[in-house]
Amino acid sequence: MSNKAPFSINFLGIRRLFAALSIILVLGSIGLLATQGLNLGMDFTGGTSVVAKGENEVIIDDVRSALEGTPFEEATVVRYGSPRDISIRVPTLNDMPADQVGPRLTEVVESKLPGVKVLQVEFVGPQVGDELRDESGLALLMALGLMLVYVWFRFTNKFGVATVVALLHDVIIVLGLFSLMRWTFDLTVLAAVLALIGYSLNDSIVVADRIRENFRDTRETDPEKIINGSLNETLSRTINTSFTTLLVLIALFFFGGEVMRAFSEALLVGIAVGTYSSIYVVTNMLFLMKVDKQDFIIPEKKEVDDMP
């Protein structure tokens, strides 16, 4: 090997077990997405958002109690930054014109909650929400397609396929968890999923670079020994990167408020799944496609004799 591995863990000894686990999680996630879908936020479904500020700390339960018995009792009430700020999100109401939701909700809030003042009212129409949903799906597909092209040219077609399969694996499982837990999926979560694609790709490329280097430099011919050694050599880097990233995301989850909670939830799950997939999904795909040393041989340039 080109570098002495600081660890000696037999990752590939249980690769078939993790391959079965990945298949079960992906199929389960697809089933959840097909049967109950995602709990789409107001960004995609349309509705009205109101931001209000109180003279003192605003109690969320008091706001929800004030909305009971009104057309807005199904609204979502969350903290918006400081304890004095709240956000009230109302989905599209069939029995009330869209232009009346903001003024009526403002009247209810300010009359039932003394000291609370509405600062901002925003409306997202259903048509805009549909466009955002379609464009978001297209953005995900484009990101995956461009990643495939990049990895295909950087490595070999086998690595390109293995890496994109790992990216799809990560995205599907994260979306499946959001469907299972009924967490709200909005533009913030979409941004987290796109960030996850970049993170997971970077992790996979580090592993792939070392595997390619060792296939070329070692006299070892057993692909399992070469890949296992490569995984051990990159393990310390993977642990350090994942750990420092998780520290930031945990801080965002606990101290970033409701606005950043969905973003941090998506990435917390995604980082764990992405780290796992860069080890087991990529390598399982390489074994499935029977990767060997011939895939990494650099062809010799033929010298052309000058014509007399």
Image (cartoon, rainbow, N blue to C red):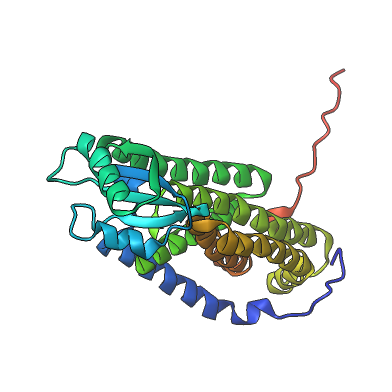
Q: Number of numbered discs present?
A: 0
Instruction: Give the answer, above or below, for where 159 lies relative to 18.
Output: above
Question: In this orientation, does residue 290 appear?
Answer: no
The image quarter containing residue 303 is: top right
Q: Where is residue 277 in the image (x, y as percent from the top left)?
A: 58, 65
The answer to whether residue 74 is left or right of residue 238 is left
The answer to whether residue 107 is left or right of residue 77 is left
Q: Residue furthest left?
A: 95
In the picture, measured across the screen, residue 234 lies left or right of residue 152, that is: right
Q: Name the image quarter holding residue 283.
A: bottom right
> Residue 237 at x, y = what percent?
77, 64
Residue at (69, 69) in percent of width and height:
223
Depth order, front residue of 295/251: 251
Which residue occupies 67% across, 77% down?
Answer: 11
Q: Which residue is drawn at 26% across and 38% down?
A: 103
Residue 20 position within the rendered picture, expressed as x and y whole percent measured from the top left:
47, 76
Q: Report the quarter where the N terminus lies.
A: bottom right
User: Is 167 situated left or right of 218 in this image?
Assistant: left
Q: Position of residue 300 (x, y in %)?
A: 79, 43
Q: Front-most of 82 and 178?
A: 82
**For the C terminus, which image quadrant?**
top right
Tell me what residue is drawn at x 52 percent, y 57 percent: 257
Q: What residue occupies the far top of the structure in this picture? A: 308
Q: Tell me if I can see residue 97 in this picture.
A: yes
**Of residues 268 and 82, the one drawn nearer to the viewer in this rendering:** 82
